[in-house]
Amino acid sequence: MQFFLEVLIGGLLAGVMYSLVALGFVLIYKASGVFNFAQGAMVFFAALTFVGLQEKFGLPFGVTLALSLAAMVVLGVLTERIVLRPLVNQPQITLFMATIGLTFFIEGLAQLIWGTEVRRLDLGIQDEPIEALMERFNILVSRFDVAAALVAGVLVAVLAVFFNKTRIGRALRAVADDHQAAMAVGIPLKQIWAIVWSVAGFVALVAGLLWGARNGVQFALTFVALKALPVLILGGFESILGAIVGGLIIGASEKLAEVYLGPMIGGGIEGWFAYIMALLFLLVRPEGLFGEKHIDRV
Amino acid sequence: MLYREAGQFRTSYEADQQIFPIRQDRIAFALLMAVAVVGVPLFASDYWLTAILIPFLVFALASLGLNILTGYAGQLSLGTAAFMAVGAFAAYNFQLRVPGIPILVSFLLGGASAALVGVAFGLPSLRIKGFYLAVATLAAQFFVPWLLVKVGWFSNYSASGVITAQKIEILGFVFDSPVRRYLLVLAIVALLALAAKNLVRSRIGRAWMAVRDMDVAAEVIGIRIMRTKLIAFAVSSFYCGVAGALYAFAYLGSVEPDAFNLDLSFRILFMVIIGGVGSILGSFLGAAFITLLPILLEVLLHGGAGLLGLNLSPGTPSMMQLVVFGGLIIFFLIVEPHGLARLWQIAKEKLRLWPFPY
């Protein structure tokens, strides 16, 4: 039982990290209807920029963070300008393919600028069990995982306030509901898109720092984004709540399956288990847990 | 002047339905085939054959398969490499376990096995669309290679996971030199391309396009969606499976799961996008483009670095390649969403009026 709890908690905390990446996808999808395959590349770019700046200039943490954020904003604005604006009114699948191109572009650019070697990122949080929990309940829970979950929680809370209480947030939601109606009441669509991509860049930066501190900043970071896709399917593309719940479900079930099911069928099932689960889930509920149901008309 | 169809009348249904209705096209195509069959083996070096022409033909076949699914039936797939892997491993196992089976038959059976797997992963397409489906096909991309590695039977319990492909031998004739393998691949690809060309203008091909353009409307006019989509998955995966078998047997010479990774899937998707979505010719143009581009970039980069006296770090060319690939994809999607095939068409229209446009 203890072991089960340990695995479950570890899985849930890992799931929070998945949600963090999935959140970036949801933000952009909600506001522009673009399924941004490049989110993973943005996570990679953000982490690499942060580490690169830190290495090169040795500035304090806050300054480096601000500089990386600025880089992400520039990236977001340029993406909107160069890639999305000419493709307005194209079918969604075209936009999706454009973001696949963007993925390759960003991955190549990041490594051209900062080099290809694996880098260590230290956020000052140890990846070791919390003693209090270990003594009282005899459960091993990593301090780092808890800290990451806390950061994710704060981020979601901030985003929720931003979306629901601020003027820009309301404009974002209006755009998400209906581009044309939003434009008709005077919401500047282009500006809003630039903001959304910048916010997604910010989320990517947070995700990149946490994942980078955990696994090292390297090309493999882009695969984390692929892990976030089943989370999205499960939760539904349009829902922030869905991204969180989906992440928790995927994280927990993936770890449990690896531990309990894995030995039976030869291990290494983490790579695809989430996908197969999402696939089976889609057969039952094609729009995901919290997604909007689409009605097709001729 | 040269390219004008004036005076060419079609007086029978056969004449009206032929693939190249214009005489100049027929001549050009015959010339192209003559060059491919006679000219290339005479003059091409082994490097050209093994490093460029054979992979080009194999990739063209694979992107033909993906184009049937994505371009004609409108179902985006990111699992192409997985279906290729199924084809390669199935062909290997048929060769290994069925005594005396002709290699062409095991290629076909490899394609058929891939078709079965394709249908299995195509089943969700009945309920989901667009990028939900794209993500679902990623499941194939991660699941299939894992299965091929984990179940030792597929690789005949090879310790390293890399197995040498069997010799290609047809009726006692061994295809061992690059020229022979090239000719074999050329023959298979040409036949399958002909079949594909006819398939997409048949009843089922038109049904695919109707489903692509709007599936609800297609259903209303009496097209059976389920059958149509699943046939598209089966045919597409068959092509990918045969391409995978050729990739392993005629190009790599070994069968290994690592060769069929996500990167290959993306590369084939890029061929389809750049070549032209929904075009048979486009698959070939795209494959040629993507096969030649890295070589061209390499030459340019090294030439440029040599001229400027720069010192390139070893990773730079491959990174440049990523940047250029990504940039080109975006460029094509914005400027010419129908790809190189459409550019060729525009060139032909211009050529009809040349040299005296109105």
Image (cartoon, coloured by chain):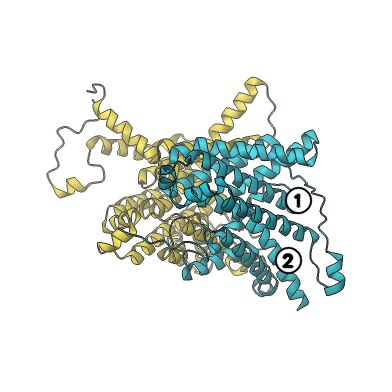
Judging from the image, mark 1 belongs to the subunit labelled A
Q: Colour of chain B?
A: yellow
In which quadrant of the rendered view does residue B257 lie? bottom right
| Mark 1 nearby-residue class (10 Å; few <14, some 14–19, many ≥20) | many
Judging from the image, mark 2 belongs to the subunit labelled A
Work out whether residue B51 can be spotted.
Answer: no
**Which numbered dot is residue A213?**
1
Mark 2 highlights which residue? A10
Q: Do the residues labelled 1 and 2 touch (CB within 8 Å)?
A: no
Give the vertical position of A95 relative to B6 (above or below): below
Q: Chain A is drawn in which colour?
A: cyan
Quadrant (top left, top right, bottom left, bottom right) of the N terminus of chain B: top left
Q: Which residue is drawn at 45% across and 34% down?
A: B43
Report x, y in % for residue A179: 43, 47
Q: What element carries label 2?
A: helix
In which quadrant of the rendered view does residue A137 lie? bottom right
- Residue at the farthest bottom position: A1
Q: How far apart are marks 1 and 2 (CA)?
A: 17 Å
Q: Which of B127 and A195 is in front in this view?
A: A195
Q: Which residue is drawn at 78% across and 76% down?
A: A2
Whether residue B16 sits left or right of residue B322 in the image: it is left
Quadrant (top left, top right, bottom left, bottom right) of the C terminus of chain B: top left
Q: Which of A23 and A6 is in front in this view?
A: A23
* Residue type, label 2: Gly
Q: What element carries label 1?
A: helix
Q: Nearer the viewer, residue A6 or B234?
A: A6
Report x, y in % for residue B238: 42, 59
Whether residue B77 sits left or right of residue B302 in the image: it is left
Report x, y in % for residue A17: 68, 57
* Residue type, label 1: Ala
Work out whether residue A78 can be spotted.
Answer: yes
Report x, y in % for residue A230: 57, 61
